[in-house]
Amino acid sequence: MRIFAIPGVCLFLGLFSGTISAQTEAGKIQKRSYEFKEAGREIDYTLYVPRSYKKSRKAPLLVLLHGLGSNPDQVIRYEGITDEAEERGYLVVAPYGYNERGWYGSQGKGKGNFLGGRPEDPENLGELSEKDVMNVLGIVRKEFNIDPQRIYLAGHSMGGGGTIYLGAAHSGIWAALAPMSPAYMGSSDILEKIKAPVMIVTGEKDTVVPVQMVRPFVQRMKELKMNHIYKEIPGGNHGPTIHNNPGLMAEVFDFFDGNSLKKENPAESVKEAFRTFTNKGGRTITARIVSSRGEKVTIARKDGKTFVIPISSLSEADQDHVARWAEAEKR
């Protein structure tokens, strides 16, 4: 199967200050950049902050992934995205994923073997693409008062494949996923790692990512009894059916509004649970959280031995778990 990089078609998809910075204009699409140290360069991302945003109230966040040959500014301008975000109070951030062909890690850590990198791309393109998304997520969470229970991930085409991959690789973060015409080339076994509800959207007549690629994933979701919605648009194609469809975007945001991370019985589901913590070096330990103060967390193994470790040394998913535990502790 071939996927063409057609502009406009294969698109989609410091400490928290508590205020909108001088560089932030609410109600406008903003192009930003940050220093990606591992990549040795500045990387762009695009941000939308609704006019209703207030530092005193937690806001939902949508992380939006562009498609092959596209960029953050294009995907965030899909019809209906910022209109729905404004109406519902969402922040929307669109990372670059290192460049327009990084695949967000869904093709592996390297350049990939399907529509892979160009000679000038780094050998670890996939790794950098994934890390860029998580870096940008971290930047937004530090600057704005983001509700950790309502962080959503969506993308189109290559971005849809990235949504599936990152939805599994960082499963503890996302409240819901919306892959659209997802160009994911790997095994459907990855679905076993996804914990969030999923809304898959595709066009019946899509010739870039045909329904024959998507339907088996949906069938596997049924077999796994996953919380999911499948919307196959009759006669729909790969491009305008998705990016010129504000009604569809309203349905996607409705889906997000109906899903957040579990809040019931936080003492049982978050505070007291043992889990396998993983540090950035790949080492693991099965333990539960005892306390979290400042930048450090105390965890205890089942044998009672405790360890005090920097939160920043943990994986992104574990850092998010610590944040949710601390939130539950305040209640």
Image (tube, grey):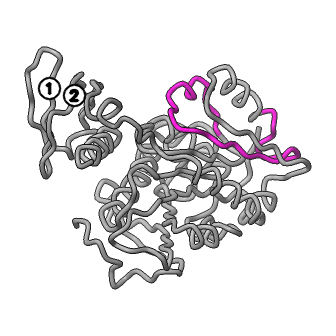
- Residue of label 1: 300
Determine which quarter of the picture holds residue 204. Answer: top right
- Residue of label 2: 288
- Near-viewer residue (56 or 68): 56
- Kindly identify the residue that appears in the image at 62 percent across and 21 percent down: 224
Choose the circle earlier in sequence order: 1 or 2: 2
Determine which quarter of the picture holds residue 249. Answer: bottom right
Element under disc 1:
strand
Element under disc 2:
strand
16 left or right of 257?
left
Determine which quarter of the picture holds residue 138. Answer: bottom left
Quadrant where the image shows the N terminus? top right
- Residue 38: x and y, percent? 30, 53
255 up-or-down from 170: above or below: below
Check residue 240 in the rendering and tell me which mark sits there, or answer none. Answer: none
Report if residue 192 lies within the magenta region: yes
Neighbor class of circle 1 (other Cα within 10 Å; few <14, some 14-19, many 20+) is some
Magenta stretch in the rendered image? 184-212
- Kindly identify the residue that appears in the image at 48 percent across and 60 percent down: 95
- Kindly identify the residue that appears in the image at 28 percent across and 58 percent down: 37
- Residue 281: x and y, percent? 24, 33
Q: Which residue lies furthest to the top in this view?
A: 303
Q: Check if mark 1's residue and mark 2's residue have beta carbons within 8 Å.
A: yes
**Tag 2: amino acid:** Arg
117 up-or-down from 69: above or below: above
